[in-house]
């Protein structure tokens, strides 16, 4: 019988894993299971041009088509099982159960089920509350964006700030509420976070920090329609729309009962092998693995380049297992990278600024971000990250190559 | 191979110039320049560039 590989998760990581399995010579059956009904599409535009570049009538079909990845011809024969998430699994027996009742048998598995947004507590009010993770989310938010709408973005991370920027450009009156002292603290540190806040406030954005949201209030005439956000100190912010961007949950419930470490995503070794399982690998936001470029602590990394990088290595690991001969044992040392567009600024990050103990301005000035800034992030005097703000792309390579060079200096 | 970048989609992220510096480069105005007919030996790095393009603007036509 032909071997069966099932890829669970039909986003970027799952797509790239399937393509790379073929590139590694795997010629058996391939099935990709997706919770959404759409084939893999590019998510970063959902908080930016997918909202600003379409009118309120944009359909889910049109948006998913415009954002769809172009799968390589090598996976033209892949079987797509879309629209029904995996709900449980028996790894010892090699069985996967989907929400629609189907049971799939597998010889090997790629775990790429990613994240779902965390939501504010409270089931009511139900209407006027949005998240931005899927095309369906973006279409729903776009339809709600009428001129002068009052929007409260809860959570001042990258997605929250990008959504705030996009909504402002579309004429909304936007307030960002962030419980930490500055926006994007984990991603860029206190100094640059404060500078970005000042920059964004100059453009008219209202930013409230050090406050969480205690509850939502419904409209008097319609309790299901959100009308206000109540902060921890009792302040009420009138809101027609609430965008919840307060982090994520990992989609690991379907793996429970198999003895895996699912503390935060799926624990993997450096080759993306799920701990203790030769026939199972993980890729994307859900994979928690050690990166010896930095240290030996296993971490999940939610940066845009990581699904592709982890999928490629996971595919090599799995193809080696299936073919019975190893092609590589080199340590896997990806350099995380992401970008963000907000309020006229382009941010480009290389490395892991979040691991740093010190941040220093390498170039430019914190009070003139438009003029270009390079922030260097040091951990015990070693450069572990850089964030570039409005720096010409022709200079990216130079800064990237300076970050966390290998071999790791101990 | 033939490489085409849809310049209406390109957002000047410069990631291709990092992945495949023999084929793509950002010029002094930080605009993309590229070789539309690179040698077939560069296929792996061109595919990498296409994969990592945030705007998915790179097309490989063989």
Image (spheres, rainbow, N blue to C red):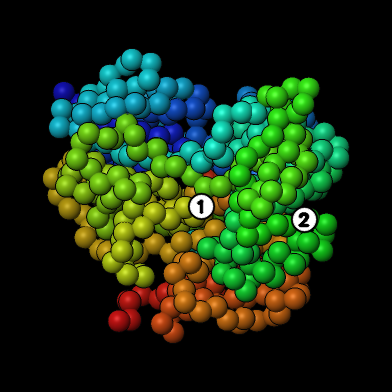
In terms of image quadrants, where is residue A152? top right
Q: Is residue A167 left or right of residue B20?
A: right
Compare residues B52 and A177 and report the one nearer the observer.
A177
Q: Can you say whether A28 is above or below A365 in the image?
A: above
Instruction: Kindly identify which residue carries mark 1.
Output: A304
Q: Chain of mark 2?
A: A
**Secondary structure found at label 2:** strand
The residue mark sitting in front, 2 or 1, is 2
Residue sitting at x 50%, y 24%: A37
Residue sitting at x 42%, y 48%: A285
Which residue is at the far front? A234
In the rendering, at what x and y percent does residue A349 appear? 55, 65
Compare residues A100 and A71 and report the one nearer the observer.
A100
Instruction: Kindly identify which residue carries mark 2.
Output: A206
Q: Can you say whether B45 is above or below A43 in the image?
A: below
In the rendering, at what x and y percent does residue B18 appear? 52, 64
In terms of image quadrants, where is residue A119? top right
Q: Is residue A248 left or right of residue A220?
A: left
In terms of image quadrants, where is residue A230? top right
Compare residues B5 and A351 and report the one nearer the observer.
A351
Q: Is residue A273 left or right of residue A183?
A: left
Query: Which class describes the residues within 10 Å of circle 1: few (<14), some (14-19), or many (20+)?
Result: many
**Secondary structure found at label 1:** loop
Q: Is residue A254 left or right of residue A405?
A: left
Q: Can residue A328 be seen here?
A: yes
In the rendering, at what x and y percent does residue A77 appear? 37, 26
Q: Can you say whether A207 is above or below A257 in the image?
A: below
Q: Chain of mark 1?
A: A
Q: How many numbered tags mark residues here?
A: 2
- On residue A95, the disc is none
Residue sitting at x 56%, y 52%: B53
Viewport quadrant of the C terminus of chain A: bottom left
């Amino acid at each position: 019988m032909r071997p069966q590989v099932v890829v669970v998760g039909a986003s970027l990581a799952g797509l790239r894993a399937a393509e790379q399995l073929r590139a590694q010579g795997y010629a058996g059956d391939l099935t990709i299971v997706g919770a959404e009904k759409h084939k893999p599409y590019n998510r970063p535009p959902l908080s930016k041009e997918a909202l600003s570049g379409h009118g309120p009538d944009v359909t889910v079909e049109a948006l998913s088509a415009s954002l769809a990845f172009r799968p390589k011809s090598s996976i033209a024969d892949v079987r797509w099982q879309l629209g029904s998430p995996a709900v449980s699994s028996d790894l010892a027996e090699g069985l996967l159960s989907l929400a629609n009742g189907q049971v799939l048998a597998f010889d090997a598995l790629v775990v790429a089920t990613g994240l779902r947004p965390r939501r504010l507590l409270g089931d009511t009010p139900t209407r006027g509350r949005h998240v931005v993770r899927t095309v369906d989310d973006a279409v729903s938010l776009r339809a709600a964006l009428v001129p002068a709408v009052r929007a409260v973005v809860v959570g001042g991370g990258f997605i929250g700030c990008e959504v705030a920027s996009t909504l402002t450009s579309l004429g909304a009156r936007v307030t960002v509420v962030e419980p930490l002292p500055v926006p994007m603290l984990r991603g860029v540190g206190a100094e640059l976070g404060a500078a970005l806040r000042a920059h964004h406030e100059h453009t008219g954005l209202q930013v409230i920090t050090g406050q969480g949201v205690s509850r939502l209030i419904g409209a008097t005439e319609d309790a299901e329609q959100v009308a206000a956000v109540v902060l921890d100190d009792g302040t009420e912010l009138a809101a027609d729309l609430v965008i919840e961007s307060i982090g994520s949950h990992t989609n690991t419930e379907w793996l429970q009962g198999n003895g895996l470490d699912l503390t935060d995503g799926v624990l993997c070794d450096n080759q993306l092998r799920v701990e203790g399982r030769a026939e199972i690998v993980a890729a994307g936001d859900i994979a928690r693995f050690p990166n010896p470029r930095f240290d030996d602590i296993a971490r999940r990394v939610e940066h845009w380049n990581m699904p592709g990088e982890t999928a490629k290595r996971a595919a090599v690991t799995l193809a080696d297992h299936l073919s019975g001969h190893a092609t590589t044992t080199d340590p896997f040392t990806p350099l995380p990278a992401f970008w963000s567009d907000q309020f006229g600024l382009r941010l480009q990050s290389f490395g892991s600024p979040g691991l740093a103990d010190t941040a220093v301005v390498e170039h430019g000035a914190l009070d003139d971000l438009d003029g270009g800034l390079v922030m260097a992030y040091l951990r015990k005097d070693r450069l572990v990250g850089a964030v570039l703000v409005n720096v010409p792309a022709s200079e990216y390579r130079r800064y990237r190559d300076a970050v966390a060079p290998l071999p790791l200096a101990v | 191979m033939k490489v085409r970048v849809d310049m209406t989609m390109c957002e000047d992220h410069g990631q291709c110039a990092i992945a495949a510096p023999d084929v793509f480069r950002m010029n002094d105005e930080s605009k993309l320049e590229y070789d539309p007919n690179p040698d077939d030996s560069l296929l792996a790095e061109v595919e990498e560039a296409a994969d990592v393009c945030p705007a998915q603007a790179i097309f490989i036509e063989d």
